[in-house]
Image (cartoon, rainbow, N blue to C red):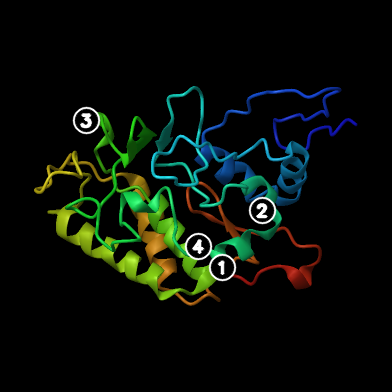
Amino acid sequence: MNWGRVLPNITLEEPEEDTLCDLFVYGDVFSDFHVTAWYHRVFDAADWSGGGIGRNWPWASGGSSILAEYGTLHLEFMHLGKLSGNPEFAQKVMNIRKVLNRLDKPQGLYPNYLNPNSGQWGQPLKLGPEAFRFDGGVEAIATRQNEKYFILRPEVIETYMYMWRFTHDPKYREWGWEAVQALEQHCKVEGGYSGIRDVYASTPNHDDVQQSFYLAETLKYLYLLFSDDDHLPFDHWVFNTEAHPLPVIAKDKTERPNEVE
């Protein structure tokens, strides 16, 4: 069976025999550029893959269920990537809202910021590093100096916003407010906000750079986290990788989203 172009720039054909192959795309790029705009095709591809995409690799020392870029026995997860907290992500795509509603203790990305079991923050500054690892007995810890910096990225705040919208669990707004306080306390400088060179240091060392995505994405997702659900509702809008809201393609005019003032 020839599937043709079921995803943009990706051609899938059913193999004649069992085949092991690699599909490598940076996790955040794949999800942000493709998944949100091509849901129906992604569902077909995930079903066709039979669980090959998003497999839960067992080398995370603490048993976290992760969805990460994987190459060899050297397992590394970039801050930009996404963690599902679900060992069978591909099979759960169609029921992702139910999965999020059932989510009790987020694993993978979040313990790097706050341990859900102890309730204690993992870093003195309450901010996460650019990258961290799950190998050699290390779980969700940045081991290299060039991985310990925080450059005001939005992905964690984005996660809180989505989780709040799906579950309305007050802890996600509480965590978001903790992030606001950490940004105000450690990143605010004269004239704006600065990244930090080492999130594990007790005193921040600023890099004197305010990234453009801090205003375009981080603050936008914080705003949406504390906004009502009917402001940019998810059944009418999707956000691209730069947090720009795009209207969902509707079958007729009656299903099209209203203009946002």
Mark 2 surroundings: few (<14), some (14-19) or many (≥20) residues within 10 A: some
Mark 4 surroundings: few (<14), some (14-19) or many (≥20) residues within 10 A: some
**Residue in view at x 16 percent, y 54 percent:** 186
Measured Cα–Cα span from mark 2 to mark 3 = 36 Å
Q: Mark 4 or mark 1: which comes first in sequence?
A: 1
Residue 75 lies in quadrant: top left
Q: Mark 1 or mark 2: which comes first in sequence?
A: 2
Residue 239 lies in quadrant: bottom right
Q: Position of residue 176 (x, y in %)?
A: 34, 65
Q: Residue 162: which numbered mark, if any?
A: 4
- Nearest the viewer among 27 and 22 is 22
Indicate left or right for 211 with 168 as reference: left
Measured Cα–Cα span from mark 1 to mark 2 = 13 Å
The amino acid marked with disc number 1 is: Asn
Q: Which residue is mark 1?
A: 101
**Residue in view at x 77 percent, y 68 percent:** 253
User: Closer to the observer: label 4 or label 1?
Assistant: 1
User: Closer to the observer: label 2 or label 4?
Assistant: 2
Q: Which residue is mark 2?
A: 92
Q: Secondary structure at mark 4?
A: helix
Q: Against 230, is 30 above or below?
A: above
- Nearest the viewer among 87 and 179 is 87
The amino acid marked with disc number 3 is: Gln
Q: Mark 1 or mark 3: which comes first in sequence?
A: 1
Q: Secondary structure at mark 1?
A: helix
Q: Are marks 4 and 1 in contact (CB under 8 Å)?
A: no
Residue 185 seen from this side: yes
